Amino acid sequence: MTPSVADSWARIETWLARHTPRTFAALEPPAEPFAIAAAEEALGQPFPASLRESLLRHNGTGYQALFPPFWMLLDVRKIIDSRQLRMRIYGDDLADREEGDPESEYGPWWHAEWIPFAADGCGDYLVVDQRRHGRRGRIGDADHETGCSFSPSPMWASLPALLDATATALETGEPVEGYCRVAVDETELEWEDA
């Protein structure tokens, strides 16, 4: 069973505070519930419970990467801005596009029921797939050039699974998805090829 969002965050925070204090200090304070509600209204859909719980713990990570290899958590405002940007870019094409198999490893370039929650700083996002299908809640990598892909790895099955895998990789030092954690100058978290 996957640990709760709160349990995984507690493990992540403990490791970051001990080993990479700059990354720990970059964790934003909790989002305000009214800001989350306003974002859900602006997007026209509710956030998944796990994303809401994570935002109520930390409203983003600033420009510090948390998930391997380089993903920074978005705050509520950036979630709205990122989704609206993708909807402006791809929105006119969404209605005319064949969706294909929603449980495939490859998705369309963008979908109105994806919620971005992490970014790499180069135009790519991690998204929670909110489409109604058997793998709802899985995490996709929405690349701005190649489209969206969904890894079959258990780490990407959900936001709680991603948080748990990240916490475990931090604690054990074992590679995750081909990357190992590194404490740069004993202050900042980075992920390097294993």
Image: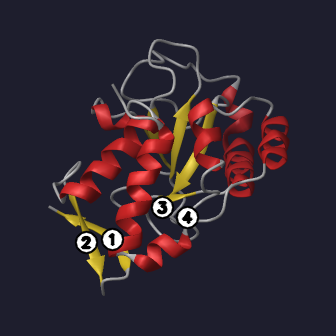
Label 2 or label 3, whichever comes before in sequence order: 3
* Residue 37 relative to residue 4: left or right: right
Label 4 or label 1, whichever comes before in sequence order: 4
Distance from Cα at disc 4 to Cα at disc 3: 12 Å
Question: The disc labelled 4 sits on which kind of residue?
Answer: Thr
According to the image, label 1 marks what residue?
190
Residue at 38% x, 53% y is 11
Task: Tell me the tag on residue 66.
Answer: none
Distance from Cα at disc 2 to Cα at disc 3: 18 Å
* Labels 1 and 3 touching (C-beta < 8 A): no
Distance from Cα at disc 4 to Cα at disc 1: 13 Å
According to the image, label 4 marks what residue?
61
* Labels 1 and 2 touching (C-beta < 8 A): yes
Question: The disc labelled 2 sits on which kind of residue?
Answer: Val
The quadrant in which residue 12 appears is bottom left
Label 4 or label 3, whichever comes before in sequence order: 4
Distance from Cα at disc 1 to Cα at disc 2: 5 Å
Residue at 67% x, 56% y is 30
According to the image, label 3 marks what residue?
120
* Labels 2 and 4 touching (C-beta < 8 A): no
Instruction: Describe the element under mark 3 as helix, strand or loop.
Output: loop
* Label 2 environment density (alpha carbons within 10 Å; few <14, some 14–19, many ≥20): some
Question: The disc labelled 1 sits on which kind of residue?
Answer: Glu
Where 59 falls versus 53 (above or below)? below
- Of residues 166 and 144, the one nearer the viewer is 166
Instruction: Describe the element under mark 1 as helix, strand or loop.
Output: strand
According to the image, label 2 marks what residue?
182
